[in-house]
Image: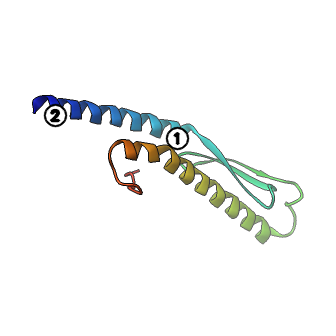
Amino acid sequence: MKGEMGKLMQQAQKMQEKMQEAQEEIARMEVEGAAGGGMVKVTMNGRHEVQRVAIDDSVVGDDREMLEDLVTAAVNDAVQKVEAETKERFSGMAGGMGLPEGFKMPF
């Protein structure tokens, strides 16, 4: 019984280390969200922090509301890409731990 418990604890520690590595990797990754056919681009890291915003000169003008909408859409696109990448990277780990499909990790 003690041997099985020790193996289980080692397995849990390895999984914790893998998850920590994955979280650090995700925090460092960058994704690009775009809107308006690429006229507005937002680069975001895995912590959902906007790193850069690029706006094509043709969009800058009198239509402020359109520009604001494009920036909003590009940020939302980047957020969705970060979420998808995070889900993809952690989906394999959940299965390896015997967790049911669709189990949401606490981060």
| Residue farthest toward the left in the current orientation of the protein | 1
Which quarter shows the N terminus? top left
From this view, report whether residue 4 is shown above or below residue 100: above
Query: Which amino acid, by three-letter code, is at mark 1?
Result: Ala
Q: Which residue is mark 1?
A: 27
Identify the residue at horizontal 35%, vertical 54% (top origin): 100
x, y (%) of residue 93? 41, 42
Category of crowding for the residue at label 1, using alpha-carbon neighbours closer than 10 angstroms: few (below 14), some (14–19), many (at least 20): some
Query: Which amino acid, by three-letter code, is at mark 2?
Result: Met
The front one of 76 and 60 is: 76
Q: Which mark identifies residue 49?
A: none
Query: In the image, which is nearer the foreground, mark 1 or mark 2?
Result: 2
From this view, report whether residue 4 is shown above or below residue 45: above
For marks 1 and 2 on the same chain, the one whose residue lies earlier in the sequence: 2
- The residue tagged with tag 2: helix, strand or loop? helix
From this view, report whether residue 7 is shown above or below residue 104: above
Residue 30, by quadrant, is: top right
x, y (%) of residue 103? 38, 55
Q: Which residue is mark 2?
A: 5
